[in-house]
Amino acid sequence: MSRTILVFDVDGTLTPARQGISPEMTAFLAETRRKLPLAVVGGSDLRKITEQLAKDHEHLLSLFDYVFSENGLVGYKGTEIYPSQTIQSVLGEQRLQEVINYALRYFSELTLPVKRGNFIEFRKGMLNLSPIGRSCSQSERDGFVAFDNEHKIREKFAAKLREKFSDYGLSFAIGGEISVDVFPTGWDKTYCLKYFESDFDTIHFFGDRTQPGGNDHEIFADPRTVGHTVKGPADTIRQVSEVLESLKLSQ
Ligand SMILES: [Mg+2]
């Protein structure tokens, strides 16, 4: 038996962005897991990932062999939790506030179709900076996506952050649909690999934002993984099926 594991992004890979998993995908994963171990690595916090993928926390942990939220800053093997680090412990309060203050100033000078609340979400391993604010509705979010595609709001913001804080040891990634993620360099999705890389010969990763600047790029391009770019949940099922077929596990 070859030691192979399948690792999945959440948004745009197992589920439509920000939405719940379909019964079809849940059944497909359960079937696949009879053949290979599965891991999930999301950028969101555990509460959000649980909401998207499962009925509750215990249920989520029962669906995968490994569950990683916040890129692996919070991680579980089965029901066992790994110790975690925080962004404030490595960056320090002063630098942290400089980044926060810069972002708030920058946002204050933007005019968008709408602005809502929760512009800065503080997570264990990252700051999630959203020009529209994370408390926007789904339709407001959709409006921002179209506006951002046209005006490159996040791209310009991320470029400014990179320029301004070039010596802070931080990475700035365009994450999801409405935000820019800020985290210590190396605390991207590759962070989770250290927990299981030595247990497997082949690590397949499936994600939708695999282009440079996307939040799946580093793990996708990492020499420790075989990267797959997916267009959405249906494409994930198709590509996983191909992998199973190539391993002669399709029955
Ligand atoms: Mg994604």
Image (cartoon, grey):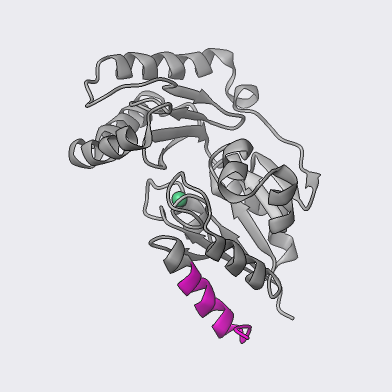
Q: Residue at position x 44%, y 66% from top?
A: 234
Dividing the picture into quadrants, the one containing residue 178 is top left
Residue 103 placement (x, y as % from top left): 38, 20
User: What is the count of numbered marks?
Assistant: 0
* 98 and 247: which is toward the camera: 247
Q: Quadrant of the N terminus?
A: bottom right
Dividing the picture into quadrants, the one containing residue 223 is bottom right
Residue 38 placement (x, y as % from top left): 66, 63
Q: Bounds of the magenta span?
A: 237-251
Q: Main secondary structure of the magenta part?
A: helix
Q: Is 130 rendered above or below residue 16?
A: above
Q: Is residue 219 inside the magenta stretch?
A: no
Q: Is 93 rendered above or below residue 54?
A: above
Quick check: 241 left or right of 114? Answer: right
Quick check: 222 left or right of 56? Answer: left
Q: Is 87 rendered above or below residue 148?
A: above
Q: Is residue 248 inside the magenta stretch?
A: yes
Residue extending farthest right: 80
The answer, for residue 63, to whether it is visible in the render is: yes
Q: Residue at position x 68%, y 60% from top?
A: 197
Residue 158 placement (x, y as % from top left): 34, 33
Q: Residue at position x 33%, y 13% from top?
A: 105
Q: Residue at position x 72%, y 50% from top?
A: 59
Q: Quadrant of the C terminus?
A: bottom right
The answer, for residue 170, to whether it is visible in the render is: no
Residue extending farthest left: 150
